[in-house]
Amino acid sequence: MISSRALIRIFLIGLVVFGLAGCGSSGHHKVVGSPAQLRHLPPPANPTQASAKFPLVAKSGQRLVEFYVQAGENNGFDFNGDSNGKLKLDIPLGWTVEIFCHNSASSLYHSCAVVSGASATSPVFPGASVPNPQEGINPGSTQSFTFVASQAGNFRLVCLVPGHESAGMWGTVVVSSTITDPELLS
Ligand SMILES: [Cu+2]
């Protein structure tokens, strides 16, 4: 006869084993910001503006997605903590994208722009950049810009301060007609 204490122990071991199995490193996984997950969170204080807590706010009715980017979140060459294309933003073709670019670094200047590919220095869509991307944004400041994702393809979210993209400061932007809901993956 198994004691109730032994049963509890077996149950707890099962939780640990299955918990670990569920967190396998299978590459990209969805993080905060997917519309499905946002539905389980309380609404942001200002629902019209994305924030660090709500990095992706999708408004399907308006075909609008707001994306809050923390440039240099780890005080390195990263966006929202990710470097070298790991951060991925999926955008439905034709949607309007508003990017709030916050420079989280303590002393470095950073910027945000959406460009066609590696080493490109001008925005791929009209308006898809902070005003002076080579110069960058003051540490602690935020600048926003809005563009229409009018062309399908794979693009880059980059920091255009010289040397920062090659140091890893870029993310992936995918615009496609097969994407129906914006997603932020990491
Ligand atoms: Cu930078």
Image (cartoon, helix red, strand yellow):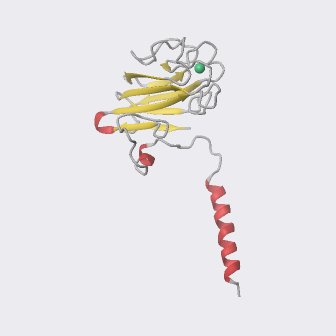
- Residue 81 x/y as whole percent: 60, 33
Identify the residue at horizontal 67%, vertical 78% (top origin). 7
- Between 167 and 130, the residue placed more toward the observer is 130
Q: Quadrant of residue 147?
A: top left
- Residue 98 x/y as whole percent: 39, 27
Identify the residue at horizontal 36%, vertical 22% (top origin). 150
Q: Quadrant of residue 71?
A: top right
- Residue 61 x/y as whole percent: 28, 38
Identify the residue at horizontal 51%, vertical 14% (top origin). 133
Q: For residue 182, say whether it is visible.
A: no
- Between 26 and 2, the residue placed more toward the observer is 2
Q: Quadrant of residue 171?
A: top right
Answer with left or right where residue 137 lies relative to residue 4. Answer: left
Q: Quadrant of the N terminus?
A: bottom right
Q: Quadrant of the C terminus?
A: top right
Q: For residue 77, say whether it is visible.
A: yes
Q: How many marks?
A: 0
User: Vertically, is 16 above or below 90?
Assistant: below
In the rendered image, the residue lying farthest to the left is 61
Identify the residue at horizontal 45%, vertical 35% (top origin). 51
- Between 105 and 146, the residue placed more toward the observer is 105
Tell which quarter ligand 1 is in.
top right
Answer with left or right where residue 83 lies relative to residue 120. Answer: right
- Residue 124 x/y as whole percent: 45, 16
In the rendered image, the residue lying farthest to the bottom is 1
